[in-house]
Image (cartoon, rainbow, N blue to C red):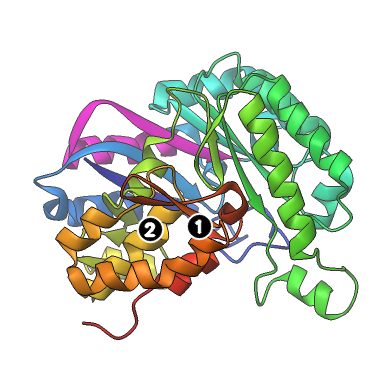
Amino acid sequence: MAGIYIHIPFCKQACHYCDFHFSTSMGKKEAMVAALQKELKLRKEEFKDEEVETIYFGGGTPSVLSSEEIKGVIQSVYENYQIGNSPEITLEANPDDLVSVQVQSKTIFKAYLKAGINRLSIGIQSFFEEDLKLMNRAHNAQEAEECIRQATKHFDNISIDLIYGIPEMTNERWLQNIDKALSFGIPHISSYALTVEPKTALASFVQKGIVKPVSDEVAQEHFNILLDKMEAAGFESYEISNFAKPGYFSKNNTAYWQQKKYMGVGPSAHSYDGEQRAWNINNNPKYIKCIEKNELPIEREKLSVTDKYNEYVMTGLRTVWGVSLNRIKNEFGEKYHEYILQQADKYLEEQLLYFNDDVLMATKKGRFLADGIAADLFMLNLG
């Protein structure tokens, strides 16, 4: 199994917390779509022996593309790759693109379905106006609710994003956000802590004292509330930030966390084939120019045994599949097996990690800290 990720590097406006690659100028949108289709053709030999089971439009804001543009990109995938039966084809979308006065919302969802989209991932982030304004989201609270109501009339497989750890967000408001999301009966929720990334507007606000950052303790409290509410509602936390009803795990997300192959198409998109990582240039004009000249603007890095071990530990510890000690011994060697046991010992004593047979997993208390724990389990000195 393999997946194709397609990066759409456009947004109507910049969210204050976002450090992803995008442009708010749509002037090169048509040329970008053509370049995406051409890159797919140029790279088809990379996946000649792979069956593609997921296609994921991320960004940026993929819903700024027309349904016809999306259809054209999907057709390019089908023309150049082997596609499995019933592939999961996801479109990230913003509420304002789905229900704004410029959009006939009753037809946009039908147009997506006709184009080939069968899963929507909607960037709600919050159902409260004050949160949306602080984050500089393009939609308002009314649009957040209306887009889900409309989407559920046409799509069964829907995910929404929610953000916790927002400045001034009380536990009560966070609970109300979760309850509102659950009230729509959607089968998948992705939820992340608001992080202050360098060189973002939010980082500037924090530095100037305009916004007071949320403490780790408050963010962890929000995370624990999330875990309890989602479990009570019948969702499984298959990855720290991803919650799904049975049968609705994101195939795209699952493939990533299980280290399956994926190809990233578009500026700044990353790829992984099990042996190397690769990434495209993060400059729209340069990306388009290279593709037009039949050149691939890609840098590649061959992974060492240590790189592969570290990546497995990072991805495994975040998920319900954990980190198999038998796999580490068989795939990476006894030195890595001994090392992870030694490094994990203090976290086992502190009940942040536990063993399920031979699988090392994070406890409920340890899940919020999983990335930091994983970093401490990384191997630095072996080749």
Q: Amino acid at mark 2?
A: Gly
Q: Which residue is mark 1?
A: 9
Q: Nearer the viewer, residue 150 or 244?
A: 244
| Rendering coords of residue 42 (x, y %) | 19, 56
Q: Is residue 132 inside the magenta stretch? A: no
Q: Is residue 101 visible?
A: no
The dot on residue 242 is none
Tag 2 residue: 266
Query: Residue drawn 42% across and 43% down?
Result: 253
Q: Is residue 211 left or right of residue 372?
A: right
- x and y percentages locating residue 277 in the rendered image: 28, 67
Total of numbered circles in the picture?
Answer: 2
Q: Find residue 305 and report its horizontal and vertical position in percent.
A: 21, 72
| Residue range corresponding to the magenta coloring | 69-93
Determine whether 180 is above or below 345 in the image.
above
Q: Residues within 10 Å of mark 1 (few under 14, many from 20)?
A: many
